[in-house]
Image (spheres, coloured by chain):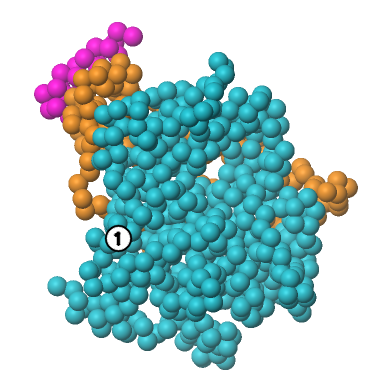
Chain colours: A orange, B cyan
């Protein structure tokens, strides 16, 4: 893809002048990586911004208009002929309409509680006081350098080469 | 209306720890705990789906696809959760009749009010339990053995470190009451560690990105917490082949070996065996609990988080917290966890205070066993919300009765209302009072201590 290549080249020159990427790009990359580490079936480090939700269950799997399928009411443990119990409206809603945690936090309104009330949002551990240390992103040893393009740390020439060949810029958008 | 069986359910994001207590035969209480995965697992190998306890029938652990009811520690997928619970309550596991049982279930710290309502709905509308009690794991720990080995009465001020699958919480407790204003959360849990190991191993050696199960096992068998991280790094670096850190993890092939294993010196490998070399991965993965900034997570490590939590507590009691730190949760099983935590806390704690860290035999099931003790030691039937109460006042019934983080906020409002009406359930609450005097002490002293 020549156009992309050209773009890369351009940005590389800009970056080499500045040495590192803009901090907000790095922050975004880090945040995305942390989100990936929270996924249940973290399979492929994502390159695009799309397709992150897909693998985490049945939530978005069903096409519009098709009846939603649940896994929980197909089974009758022990007694297959057990009579179908009537499910209450509330329970039905909870089973059929899954919401992700961010939505639930928003709907719970805990963000609007007075600041002296401890909540999930206020309970996060404080930011670190000690400065972060560099660890080589390739071998895990103490890193002394950062990649000029993507700012990932590495420890020596050898790891730098590995980094350049395999991983460089993978996470930068 | 006394129910004969009480179901104790420690509903973890990774595994459920469950068992039954029979009220009638007080003597031989069956604290026999069943541990089942809290997941709906699809196996590519044998093309079938295993729900919760059915996992034990699974023979092929390669490329398992997990559907977990929990996201970041909170219960959001009720369809999956119901499927797992259905199996758990059925005759295949516990074999209970919900309508004749009472339930003790754990919920995550700072559970959201809208999620709590769904708990109520499931317990009463779907399963129709006679009554139930919902609490956090740490709140029952004072009733267990962790802080009172033998028969010694537990200390008044304790600090529970609960490091589980989704996150790690530091929970200070005074007089069996959680001090919510000082509870702190570190967003590092077993799930993140396994995923990190998956990623690192896949980048450096074999592609293990689909092998969550295997890598979790590798993590549990090989990883340890280093007491001197930089020195261990040097050891691995200077002599990659011959050092006492490097281990070889023999991957399972699912025809002969179903589980991976650590290769012993005399262990002969067959030509088909595949080996994952674990070098600095062994200690740099659990290291994230102590240095979350290594992966860019802007949070203090566990030790600093504990210190920060203790600093928020009444200054005259802080010494007691330093001396009574208890560990629960699967991550505390890493070798060297306690030693590392101790050495870091020792340097963070004021020198006049003693630092003491308590461990239990099985950090996984400690909350379950404490829950059983809680049921036996308290007037459990007074603490629960009954189905009749739920039918009368809905979610308000449990909001009023269960002591969680919202109580501190509702406290003033509720008690005023209560007095104005007729002092509703003052008896239960009096016994487990919310220690108004302490808060006074606290505000008085922090001001003098602060510089």
Q: Main secondary structure of the magenta part?
A: helix
Q: Which residue is mark 1?
A: B345
Please provide the residue range marked out in magenta. A1-21
Q: Is residue A4 magenta?
A: yes
Residue at image coords 58%, 88%: B427
Q: Nearer the viewer, residue B153 or A14?
A: B153
Number of on-image labels: 1
**Which residue extends farthest front?**
B266
In the rendered view, does B112 fall on the left or right side of B383? left
Using a 10 Å C-alpha cutoff, classify the residue at mark 1 as few (fewer than 14 neighbours), some (14 to 19) or many (20 or more).
many
Give the x, y percent position of residue A79.
86, 49
Residue at image coords 21%, 14%: A9
Quadrant placement of the C terminus of chain B? bottom left
> Can residue A147 be seen?
yes
Give the x, y percent position of residue B443.
28, 80
- Helix, strand or loop at label 1? It is helix
Disc 1 chain ID: B
In the rendered view, does A65 fall on the left or right side of B158? right
């Amino acid at each position: 893809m020549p156009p992309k290549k050209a773009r890369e080249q351009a940005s590389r020159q800009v970056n080499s002048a500045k040495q590192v990427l803009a901090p907000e790009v790095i922050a975004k990359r880090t945040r995305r990586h942390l989100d990936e580490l929270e996924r249940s079936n973290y399979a492929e480090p994502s390159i695009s911004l799309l397709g992150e939700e897909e693998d985490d269950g049945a939530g978005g799997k069903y096409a519009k208009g098709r009846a939603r399928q649940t896994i929980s009411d197909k089974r009758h443990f022990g007694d297959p002929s057990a009579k179908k119990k009537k499910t209450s409206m509330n329970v039905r809603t909870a089973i059929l309409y899954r919401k992700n945690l961010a939505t639930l936090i928003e709907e719970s309104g805990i963000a609007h509680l007075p600041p002296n009330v401890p909540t999930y949002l206020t309970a996060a551990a404080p930011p670190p006081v000690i400065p972060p240390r560099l660890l080589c992103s390739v071998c895990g040893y103490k890193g002394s350098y950062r990649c000029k393009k993507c700012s990932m740390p590495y420890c020596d020439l050898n790891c730098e080469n590995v980094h350049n060949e395999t991983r460089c810029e993978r996470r930068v958008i | 209306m006394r129910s004969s069986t009480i179901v104790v359910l420690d509903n973890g994001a990774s595994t459920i720890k469950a068992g039954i207590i029979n009220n009638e035969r007080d003597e031989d209480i069956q604290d026999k705990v069943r541990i089942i995965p809290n997941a709906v697992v699809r196996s590519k190998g044998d093309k079938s789906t295993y729900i919760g306890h059915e996992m034990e029938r699974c023979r092929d652990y390669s490329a398992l696809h997990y559907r977990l009811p929990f996201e970041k520690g909170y219960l959001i997928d009720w369809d999956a959760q119901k499927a797992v619970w259905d199996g758990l309550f059925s005759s295949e596991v516990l074999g209970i009749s919900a309508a004749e049982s009472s339930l003790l279930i754990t919920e995550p710290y700072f559970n959201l009010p809208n999620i709590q309502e769904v708990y109520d709905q499931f317990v009463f509308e779907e399963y129709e339990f006679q009554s139930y009690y919902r609490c956090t794991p740490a709140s029952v720990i004072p009733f267990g053995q962790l802080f009172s080995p033998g028969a010694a009465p537990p200390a008044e001020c304790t600090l529970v470190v609960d490091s589980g699958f989704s996150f790690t919480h530091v929970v200070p407790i005074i007089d069996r009451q959680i001090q919510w204003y000082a509870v702190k959360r570190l967003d590092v849990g077993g799930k993140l560690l396994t995923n990190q190991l998956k990623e690192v191993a896949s980048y450096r050696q074999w592609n293990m990105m689909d092998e969550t199960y295997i890598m979790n096992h590798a993590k549990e068998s090989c990883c340890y917490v280093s007491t001197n991280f930089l020195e261990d790094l040097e050891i691995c670096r200077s002599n990659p082949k011959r050092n006492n850190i490097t281990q070889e993890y023999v991957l399972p092939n699912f025809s002969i070996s179903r589980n991976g294993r650590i290769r012993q010196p005399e262990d002969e490998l067959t030509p088909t065996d595949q080996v994952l070399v674990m070098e600095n991965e062994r200690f740099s993965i659990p290291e994230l609990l102590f240095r979350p900034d290594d992966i860019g997570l802007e949070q203090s490590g566990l030790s600093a988080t504990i210190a920060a939590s203790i600093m928020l507590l009444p200054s005259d009691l802080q010494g007691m917290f330093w001396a009574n730190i208890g560990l629960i949760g699967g991550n505390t099983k890493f070798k060297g966890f306690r030693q590392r935590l101790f050495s870091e806390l020792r340097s963070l704690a004021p020198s006049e205070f003693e630092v003491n860290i308590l461990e239990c035999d099985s950090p996984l099931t400690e909350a379950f066993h404490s829950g059983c003790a809680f049921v036996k030691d308290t007037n459990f039937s007074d603490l629960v919300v009954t189905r009749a109460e739920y039918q009368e006042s809905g979610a308000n019934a449990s909001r009023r009765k269960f002591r969680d983080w919202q109580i501190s906020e509702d406290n003033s409002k509720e008690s005023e209302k209560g007095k104005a009406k007729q002092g509703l359930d003052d008896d239960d609450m009096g016994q487990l009072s919310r220690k108004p005097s302490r808060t006074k002490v606290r505000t008085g002293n922090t001001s003098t201590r602060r510089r």
